[in-house]
Amino acid sequence: MNANGKNAPEVELIMINIAGHDKPGVTAALSDILARYNAQILDIGQADIHHNLTLGLLIKTDSSVSGDIMKDLLFKGYEMDVQVRFTPVTPADYERWVGLQGKNRWIITILGRHLSARHIALVSGVVTDQQLNIDSIQRLTGRMPLDEHEIQHSKSCVEFSVRGNPRDHSEMQRRFMHIASEEGIDISLQEDTMYRRCRRLVCFDMDSTLIRTEVIDELAERAGVGDQVRAITESAMRGEIDFTESFARRVALLKGLDESVMKDIAENLPITEGLDRMMTVLKRTGYKTAILSGGFTYFGNYLKQRFGFDYVYANDLEIVDGKLTGRYQGEVVNGRRKAELLKLLAQVENINIKQTIAVGDGANDLPMLSTAGLGIAFHAKPKVKAASDQSISTIGLDGILYFLGFKDSFIG
């Protein structure tokens, strides 16, 4: 009873679902009705798919006015040509839903040239098997083209937000890797922590990551020792021989090469798809970027000037009288050194290591990939991909933006 000795109105929880052709003012008109009856909105969500609106509201209201609310909403829905449906919610159901809010949230990103219903079904099946609940699904890429030729050059990305604690996190990751390999797509699983939302530093390998070649192989071709150097490079990238040893052996084979060759190679470097777009967005949104390369400073500085990287750490070739001597200067930037530089740059920028991202393709990138808050194996060797939690193998470098939650509609 209330203070006047009368029975207090019972509280009702009602789930309201609105669907129909989207038009300006629908949400405003319907929420205005709820406001007139002092209804409390406990949860709200809205999506627009090809101009079709889906709006959900969970409200708390007095039973004395619930009938009037539903009547007014139905009339307004008819007037605005949208369907309105009501579902009662018990306090027990509501408490179970509230209980889920304390559980972990995960972000699953599915990425490829084209995503099919099969891909969505496979990923959703893993989510179900792990007893997780899908809170929302959104498309991060622009509208898919209908022309088959355009589809071949397009990219498609869908992001799942799921809640709960996986029954077996390792098994979940393993199944996603298997699906990605079998279906020719990329799948990222990230815990949705505060650090995921505030990454600040991205460190990149250069050769076969920012550019579609190994510069030392290009130099070797000009020096006439291409086959010898390429064989050493491939062995090192597979992790079969120590990087520092392989580096010294390859540089020695370049002895006598004219330094003018370096300028010509730099001006004709094959740039990886998506680099320009990715750098434009990262700079616009305040990220710091670095090149941490086992290649050469000369070419890193060229990319720095062209695309606006903030830092370059690589190796310096010794040049005497305009010729390469076959020696290098300073400490070799190997895998261990890359991880050290990542930590150093995080300190310089005064950020937590969990706010860093590392991107690379070779075995010598693994230390920095495992050190960074988010390590991404990019078009990587099988050994590197298998050892990494995140990978991109289907599209260009701008795919990294989707792993950070950027949408095409925001970044252009």
Image (spheres, helix red, strand yellow):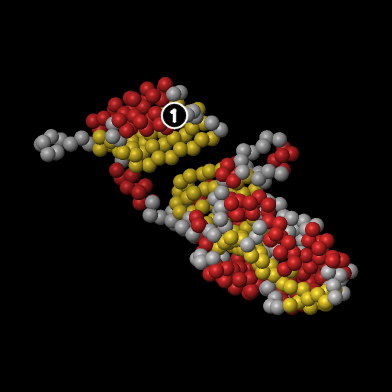
**Where is 259 relative to 143, above or below?**
below
Taking the view exactly as shown, the residue that stands out farthest to the right is 224
Q: How many marks?
A: 1
What x and y, as percent, mark residue 296?
A: 74, 69
Q: Is residue 405 left or right of residue 321?
A: left
Q: Closest to the observer: 124 or 240?
A: 240
Q: Closest to the observer: 114 or 166?
A: 114
Q: Is residue 347 left or right of residue 29?
A: right
Residue appearing at x 68%, y 73% in the figure: 333
Q: Is residue 167 left or right of residue 35?
A: right
What x and y, as percent, mark residue 35?
A: 32, 33
Displayed quadrant of residue 256:
bottom right
Instruction: Assign the C terminus to one quadrant of the image.
Output: top right
Residue appearing at x 68%, y 52% in the figure: 276
**Where is 322 relative to 159, above or below?**
below
What x and y, as percent, mark residue 6?
A: 13, 34
Residue appearing at x 43%, y 40% in the figure: 45
**Where is 256 relative to 385, above or below?**
below
**Where is 179 relative to 289, above or below?**
above
Q: SS for tag 1?
A: loop
Instruction: Assign the N terminus to one quadrant of the image.
Output: top left
Q: Is residue 387 visible?
A: no
What x and y, as percent, mark residue 136?
A: 48, 44
Residue appearing at x 43%, y 56% in the figure: 104
User: Callout 1, which amino acid?
Assistant: Gly
Q: Is residue 266 visible?
A: yes
Pointer 1 residue: 25
